[in-house]
Image: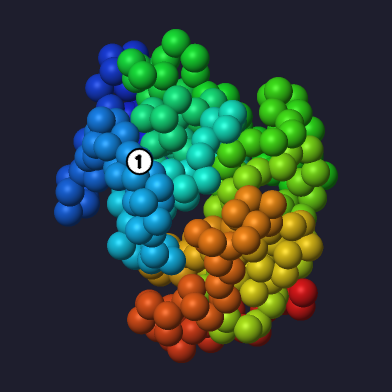
Amino acid sequence: MKKLFKLLLIFIFEKTGIDGIRFFKKIRSTGDFIGTISRAKQIELLEIYRKQLADNQHEDPNFKNISFRNFSQNGEDGIILYIFATIGFTNRKVIEIGCGNGVECNSANLLIHHDFEGLLIDTDPLNIRYGKAYYRRHRDVRTWLPHLVGSLVTAENINDLIEQNNFQGAIDLLSIDIDGMDYWVWKAIEVISPRVIVAECNNLWEPEVAVTIPYDPNFVSDAPEYYAGASLAALNKLAKEKGYRLIGANRYGFNAFFLRNDIDASQKYFPEVTPAECQTHPYCVYARTVKKEKITQRKWTNI
């Protein structure tokens, strides 16, 4: 019934432009967070950050102080903006694997406010329909729409999916949030070289435990128990193998940020941090002490 209701709202949006999904989401939430910080304000922020860097007034980044959300779930928009204020944009290309509806995600702010070209992939065809309708009606992007692709993502097909949509080589940002084979899909990616990677981790595990769920191309997460994904320590090991370092996480410790090692190689602006430093929030402690017991007896692969 819920899926049929969502389909009806998407159909109305496609035909009329009345976005029922966002309307009902606003009612359910404490406030509509989407689009609250304008393009002009973000450009102003970029200039403030750049001036601080030029004047050598920067401090080691505290992601809690620079986070905000226009479209992201937990402040990632602000963190991403700060990172690129520091390292600069290049080709302004973003790929998001597990983009949801393509609006509440890590790519949307870059697509709408910072002229990025995007490839957004999600398994749910309704999410893709909604995202396409949203961007077709958005004045800032409808002339050159992001690629929204509906597909199950596996380690076997991810490189083909990327290449078939004309993305390869260096890109500015890769975001991975598929609630399942995140570790294995990232491990398989070879056709792109992102400068920055945002990857969701399973923060039910202690920071030193490196585990992932076993590979299964047909896996479906059984949230809310959250038997899915990989621990931050496992993702950090993979990042090191691929030439990246961990530079921080969102405040709840489940979206981690990695920077390619050749960028800020001296680590002047983004020193490497440990998984333990990224998972100090009380929610992380709660997750490890209360929620973890529901998944510990299931199959995990040590990394």
Q: Quadrant of the C terminus?
A: bottom right
Q: Secondary structure at mark 1?
A: helix
The one of 102 and 57 positioned closer to us in this rendering? 57
Residue at the far top: name it.
Answer: 143
Outermost residue, bottom direction?
289
Compared with residue 192, is residue 254 higher up or lower down, i.e. above or below?
Answer: below
Residue type highlighted by circle 1: Leu
The quarter of the displayed image where residue 147 is located: top right
User: Where does label 1 land, which residue?
Assistant: 46
Count residues near mark 1 (Cα–Cα under 10 Å), then give few for <14, some for 14-19, many for 20+: some
> Could you say where residue 125 lies in the image, as x and y percent from the top left?
54, 33
- On the question of residue 188 being in view, the answer is yes
Residue at coordinates 76% horizontally, 57% vertically from top-left? 242
Query: Quadrant location of residue 231?
Result: bottom right
Which is nearer the eye, 296 or 158? 158
193 sits to left or right of 226: right
Q: List x then y, in percent, for residue 140.
A: 36, 19
User: Is 109 placed above or below 82 here?
Assistant: above
State left or right for residue 216 relative to residue 24.
right
How many labels were placed on the picture? 1
User: Residue at image x 40%, y 69%?
Assistant: 252
In the foreground, 300 or 262:
262
Image-based side of 188 in relation to 202, left or right: right
Q: Quadrant of the N terminus?
A: top left
What residue is drawn where x is 25% and y is 30%?
A: 40
